[in-house]
Image (cartoon, rainbow, N blue to C red):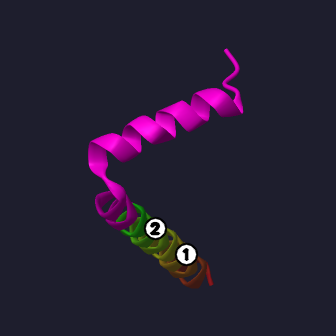
Amino acid sequence: MNMGWVELLIILAVVLLIFGGSKLKSLGSDLGSSIKGFKKAVKDDESKEEKEED
């Protein structure tokens, strides 16, 4: 099932109506900081493993 740009635009409009612009902006920034924290934790864990192998 392929979704075209029209379907994505409709979904975005519905999400915007449900959450509102400011809530959607804060959700995006929270998601971005969560991803950044996860990547940092994975990188730190990998560096620990490399130090233990040496």
Residue placed most toward the observer, 47 or 33: 33
Stretch of the chain drawn in magenta? 1-27
Coordinates of residue 27 in the picture (x, y in percent): 34, 60
Residue placed most toward the observer, 33 or 18: 18
The N terminus sits in image quarter: top right
* Residue for badge 1: 43
Label 1 is placed on what type of residue?
A: Lys
Kindly state the secondary structure of the residue where label 2 is placed.
helix
Disc 1 vs disc 2: Cβ atoms closer than 8 Å? no
Coordinates of residue 54 in the picture (x, y in percent): 62, 84
Q: Quadrant of residue 28?
A: bottom left
Q: Which comes before the other along the chain, label 1 or label 2? A: 2
The majority secondary structure of the magenta stretch comes to helix
Camera-near label (1 vs 2) is 2
**Residue located 40% across and 62% down the image:** 31
Side (left or right) of 19 relative to 47: left
Q: Residues within 10 Å of mark 1 (few under 14, many from 20)?
A: few
**Residue located 33% across and 67% down the image:** 26
Label 2 is placed on what type of residue?
A: Gly
Kindly state the secondary structure of the residue where label 1 is placed.
helix
Q: Is residue 35 above or below residue 6?
A: below
Q: Is residue 15 above or below residue 4?
A: below
Q: Quadrant of residue 8?
A: top right
Side (left or right) of 52 relative to 23: right
Residue placed most toward the observer, 18 or 2: 18
Q: Residue 3 in magenta? A: yes
What separation in Å lies between label 1 and label 2 (alpha carbons)?
17 Å
Residue placed most toward the observer, 9 or 32: 9
* Residue for badge 2: 32
**Residue located 44% across and 67% down the image:** 38
Res. 10 mark: none
